[in-house]
Amino acid sequence: MTCKHLLLFALVLILFTGCSGASLVTAYSHTPDLEQASTDVVSEAEPAQALTVPAGPVKNAYLTIDDGPNSHFTGIYLDILKKYNAKATFVVVGSNIERNPEVFRRILDEGHSIANHTFSHDYKKIYASPEAFLEDLDRGNKSISAITGSEVKMFRAPGGASRLTSSFNGVLDSHGYKHLGWNVSSADSDPNGISSQQIIDNIKNGVIAVEKMEKSPIILIHDGTEINLGTDKPGTAVHNYIRSRESGVAALPEVIEFLLDRGYTLAGADENTPAAW
Ligand SMILES: [Zn+2]
């Protein structure tokens, strides 16, 4: 009995030592792989694309950036988007394309989408009649096609679709134009000015609200027309306008990170983008 117990004890001891030894070897031999894996994670974390692959079907969010190309702010927006490998839609004004063709080329070169926002963005002129609107929109398309070689049928009415009455829509539909609306507003065109935190909060709250309606977020922000840097007195409309563009630039990284964290891919809009409403 004693002998058997001793033998059994010796066997158990050998087995345990062997397992421990094996475990140690296994753990040690895995260490370089774990280091490699963690290195891979670090290197993949650099481009944000790695974070945009959702587990389920692709969920797109659309950043739409109105009123440029702008000689100062558009480039800053493009730098931020590039850092995250995010795509957006630049809703461009023809007269600003003619002022800043190199900025427009950069938008295209970096793979973003384009929508036509008329040539003049002059409410008095474009809303005088459906024909006046169409003429200005066609002129905007000429500015676009002079650089891209083709027109775009996706457009956004300055001030939004609510300004288009049925007679306007009838004319625009018959010419194949398709309106790009929005369902999340940053409110960055508030004439009283807006802080970056307000922009972030407006977008976060708006995205959560449209998710409840099972809509893809189409977010409205502005890179602005050619009012860039200035020394206007605080409280003036120009001062507020400039500060609001600066707020937009400051808000954008957190907005993008918020969308990526929620599993969205930041995509450029096209004619197949689901309607905002
Ligand atoms: Zn506009």
Image (cartoon, helix red, strand yellow):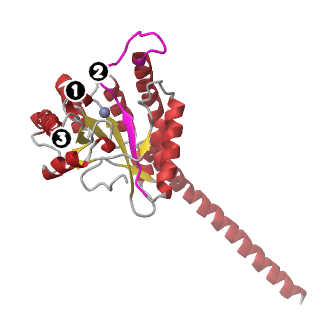
Q: Earlier in the sequence, mark 3 or mark 1?
A: 1
Count every numbered label the image shows and give the total. 3
> Is residue 268 highlighted in magenta?
no
Q: Residue furthest bottom?
A: 1
Q: Is 8 positioned to the left or the right of 100 in the image?
A: right
Q: Earlier in the sequence, mark 1 or mark 2?
A: 1
Q: Which residue is mark 2?
A: 226
Q: Residues within 10 Å of mark 3 (few under 14, many from 20)?
A: some
Look at the image and give the residue range highlighted in magenta. Answer: 215-237
**Magenta stretch holds residue 217:** yes
Closer to the camera, 133 or 216? 133
Q: Image quadrant for the C terminus?
A: bottom left
Q: Nearer the viewer, residue 79 or 255?
A: 255
Q: Is 199 rendered above or below residue 177? A: above
Q: Which mark is residue 130?
A: 3
Label 2 crowd bin: few (<14), some (14–19), many (20+), radius 10 Å: some
Cβ(mark 3) to ligand 1 < 8 Å? no
Is residue 36 shown to the viewer in this render? no
Circles 1 and 2 in contact, beta carbons < 8 Å = yes
Image location of residue 53, percent across then percent down: 41, 55
CA–CA distance in space, label 3 to label 1: 23 Å
Q: Name the residue at 65% across, 61% down.
A: 24
Local SS, label 3? helix
For the residue marked with disc 1, what is the amino acid? Answer: Asn
Residue 151 is drawn in which quadrant?
A: top left
SS state under label 2:
loop
Reading the image, the residue beneath label 1 is 96
